[in-house]
Structures are given as C-alpha cells and as structure tokens.
Amino acid sequence: MFKLKNRSDKDFSLGWTHEEIITPLVKEFINSYKNLPFYAYQIQDKFRDELRAKSGLLRGVEFLMKDLYSFHADEKDLDSYYEKMKKAYFNIFDKCGLSTKTFLTLAAGGTFSKYSHEFQTLTTSGEDEIYLCKKCKLAVNKEIIKQEKNKCPKCGNKSLSVEKAIEIGNIFQLKDKFSKVFNLNFVGKDKKEKLVFMGCYGIGLSRLMGAIVEINHDDKGIIWPKEVAPFLVHLIQVENNQKINKAAFGLYEDFQKQGIEVLYDDRQDKSAGEKFVDADLIGLPLRIVVSERT
Amino acid sequence: MFKLKNRSDKDFSLGWTHEEIITPLVKEFINSYKNLPFYAYQIQDKFRDELRAKSGLLRGVEFLMKDLYSFHADEKDLDSYYEKMKKAYFNIFDKCGLSTKTFLTLAAGGTFSKYSHEFQTLTTSGEDEIYLCKKCKLAVNKEIIKQEKNKCPKCGNKSLSVEKAIEIGNIFQLKDKFSKVFNLNFVGKDKKEKLVFMGCYGIGLSRLMGAIVEINHDDKGIIWPKEVAPFLVHLIQVENNQKINKAAFGLYEDFQKQGIEVLYDDRQDKSAGEKFVDADLIGLPLRIVVSERT
C-alpha cells in the first residue's frame, strides 16, 4: 500500500481496497433485519504498489475498479447471493468476448473463507500462472495448488496444465471480518443483535479493457465486441463534395437520432487509405463507407 | 505536490496539474499550421498538498477537475479563444446558479502573463479573500492588490470590499512556456518552424458541486438548479396498494421513456413525513407526489 505524509506531517494512504470506507458508511443505513440485504457499489480509482508494473492497462499502479459490497442477515443469504454473482460475472465476461478464455480460479480465502474466487483470462501477456483442469474447467492458483497437492480440488484430475493468465475480477466472502471490526450490527427478527455478513465483488475495469484487446485483435488492430465497443459504427467519408458531405452527414444524424453511437471520420486532410488503416486499428464492430463509387 | 516511492524505490508523484502530460501527448498530433488550433480536454482526479484541507468538497486533498488545453499558431488566436472561454465559463456558472455570486478575479500570471484569471464565488465558507470593486464587478486577489496599491486596476476605484470566496475555476495563458520545454513546434504557412501557443482552462468539478450547494440551499437542504440537478424529478409514492403502485410506476416509466431523469422513492418502510424530509434534503427541482388523496 502506498503511504505518504502531507506538509503538516499528517498520514495519508492511497486506497488499495475500500472495505474500511464502505463498512462504516453503510452502518448509517443498517439497523434492522428489514434493511437487509443491502448492496452498495462504486467505480473508483485504486492504487497498488506493484513491484512489476507493466503491460500498460494490464498491470498498472493506478487502475479503475468496480466494487460491489453486499450485506446480509446470515451466511445462507450471503452464499446464495455469492452464487448469483458468479453467474453475473460470467455473463459480463461473455459480453466482453472473453468467455472461452476466462476461468473461475480458486485462490486463498484468508482467515474466514477456505477459498476466494478469481476470474482469470488466459493470455500470454498475463503475469499470473494458473493450474487449469481441462476436465472440469476449474483453475487454481499457485497458493492453492500446493495445499491441494497438484490435483484439481473438484474432480481429482492430476494432469493440470499451467497457463499464463490475467486476473480481471474477483469475488470474496468477507463474512463478519469487517462488520466485527466496525461493529456493523443489526437487530434480527428475534430482537437479538447480530453481526452483518458481507461479500465483495470486484472487476478491474481498466485491466478488463486491456484483456479484451489482448484477446480480441488481429495484426491490424483491435476487434471490439459490440457490447463493449466505444462506438458501434465507424462512418467513413472518403471524398469531399457537397453531395457526399450531405449524404454522410445525413447518415450520421440518423444514427444519432436512433441512439446508435457512431464515430464519424470526416477528416479532410486524410486519404481514404489512412482512414481505413485507422479504422482497422480502432476496430469498431460496423463500418460504413460513403463515397462517390458506392 | 505529493511525492512517494514504491517498493522498488522508484519515484512517483500524484498529479496536481497536467501540462507536463498533455504537451508531449499532443506533440503526436501537431506538425503543421493545418493542425492548429487544437483542443484537448479531460476530466481527471488531482491531488494537492493543502495545508488546511477542510469544508468537505470545498477544499479537498483529492478532487475532480475538468481541464481544457488549447493550442494555437500565434498569440492573437490564443487571445481570441481566451476571451471566448471567459464567456463560456460565465455561461456554465450561470447554469449552476452561481452567476450573481461569481466574479472574474485577477491573479498573478507567473512568468509569461501579467495576469491569470480565477472565477471566485462569494461564500462565507470560502477560504480565499478577494478585493471586490463593486463599480466594475472586477475582483483582485491579495497578490495583485499589493501590486496595484489597493485600487481597482480597471477603473481606479479605491473603496474595494474584502469578501470571502471560493475559487471554482481558472484560466491561464501558458503561451510558449511548456511548448518550449517539450519542443512543441509546428511548420507555419511560411515554412518556418514556430512554437505553439498554449492556454489552459480548469473547473474544479467536485469543488463546484460544493459551491453550488453553499449558494443554493435553505435550512431544510439543497435547492438544485435544474441544469445541474442529479435528477429533474423526485417522484414520491406515499401509500402502497395495487392502484397507487400502478399509477406511480406508470409515471416513472413515462418519465424514463421521455428521457427525463427521475428519482423514484418507492420505499415501503418509510412514512410520508420521512420521504418529504429526505426530498427537502436532496432538493430536486420538481416533486411529484402520488397518493390516494391527490
């Protein structure tokens, strides 16, 4: 964790995880079992003191992260929500074009859970190494593989393959770890005070963007999956005369009216060739070319 | 400026201004006078080592800022754009409900300009002190007032009033200060190499939000100007039965279909009184109450 002092010698730290912020905040909203379950999310910068910061967005010292924290009346409710989140995350990674390359990966669970779960995407640019069971599509990371003696904890398979991967998300049962420290209690149906059970669910958004590009590209550039493309349509105007200008700009306005995100390349100082090279590099899902000959 | 080291003893600093980032970046896009003028903006976190961080959003160590940087072929083009930006900023602050309380304030200009301009909003919660000429609506800050011997630099008025204020924006002619350091040149129409002229234009977004609330509130809570309200409509459902649910949810859907941002308070465990108190506190421009009696 990065720590620093200001000019008045006061201590500051750059957020690397936010349970210590969210738990006391949420305390304001939870008193009774009627307030549970409760969910709060944020999209926020995080900072980690990476020894080997590298590969651009894949492993940065500063990165954008989506965090969701869930708060439950008991462990059973946490368990059931946790399973829902597993599925939701796979749906998200599916839309990002990463589903065939992304594996639920067992990692160490800390004091309270046997395991946490990482979502690891196979790519040679990844820095992590995971042990993949091709039988049951489960992966385990190094710390676990030692504990499990080189076999898949699910099916017992001993021929695991070692793969390079990048962690794009993780989910974790915090249980009462933080609610104990911050006295996050609630009054149950039985009028008794109890500790809230917590889970956390993170996606490294900037890292995910890097992973999407690692997986979805050719030698000319990016190939954006349409669900996460910055624009759906790349509209390229090749010549410049009144007729073409009018036609292309008309199309541009039509797309916008329909709520379709469109990148309109109307640059007058670039050749058709340059525009096509740029379009290949950016890699939007649909390309429309307006020229005299089409 | 905050500086820190990572575990490998490498130096890092937390961005407090971004000219050093944008100038070399923009160098990739500017070669000829044909590429000018050029404008680039960002919305990004900044960090300043404030000795007296206080008053929540009004003076934070970390804050969100909108920066625009402009790049020009000569000083005349910079000057004319700079005047446009002055007007644009006043338009923005007008929409934020701050126009009558916000004054263009002369500040020190550094090495290259006689003055820079701050936009200061009068509020007793402000930490800055400005000297306001009520004759010509110009304000000057302390450093300038010394230099100008306690009189308005525009009209010569000597009875200036001292007011507490908060700086919500600033604009600055950088001229060739950074383009010289980073060799940001371009080839002119006359085929000669010249230095690019730069200007920068900032709004402290999180601080602006604080200032809006300081100026626009009563003793019950915020009164959001409609242009910057987080939602236009606060839809409050008072009772819970099939008829009311249907009516309120129907309205909610209608608003959304029309692209009107609506906050729908359908909480079943809160009384009408609690909902109204919360609505006063949040202070959205329009309130619609759905109940059996309306």
Image (cartoon, coloured by chain):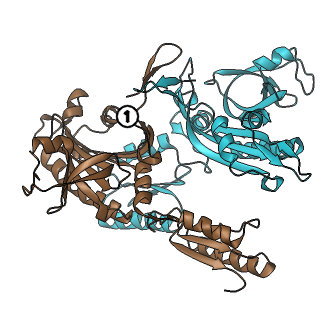
Chain colours: A brown, B cyan
Q: Residue at x 22, y 45 (%)?
A: A34
Q: Which residue reaches farthest bottom?
A: A293
Q: Quadrant of the C terminus of chain A?
A: bottom right
Left or right side of A69 for B48: right
Left or right side of B277 for B21: right
Picture quadrant where residue B111 is located: top right
The residue lying toward the viewer, choosing from B263 and A99, is A99
| Residue hosting label 1 | A16
Q: Visible in this render: residue A74?
A: no
Left or right side of A121 for A223: right
Which chain letter goes with mark 1?
A: A
Image vertical order of residue B163 relative to residue B170, above or below: above
The spot of residue B73 in percent (x, y) is: 84, 47
Picture quadrant where residue B132 is located: top right
The residue lying toward the viewer, choosing from A146 and A227, is A146
Q: Secondary structure at mark 1?
A: loop
Q: Residue at x 18, y 40 (%)?
A: A143
The residue lying toward the viewer, choosing from A18 and B190, is B190
The spot of residue B198 in percent (x, y) is: 77, 40
The spot of residue B129 in percent (x, y) is: 71, 20
Q: Residue at x 80, y 47 (%)?
A: B186
Left or right side of B171 for B79: right
Image vertical order of residue A116 relative to residue B145, above or below: below
Amino acid type for the residue under numbered disc 1: Trp
Q: Quadrant of the N terminus of chain A?
A: top left
Image vertical order of residue A30 relative to residue B26, above or below: above
Q: Visible in this render: residue A268?
A: yes
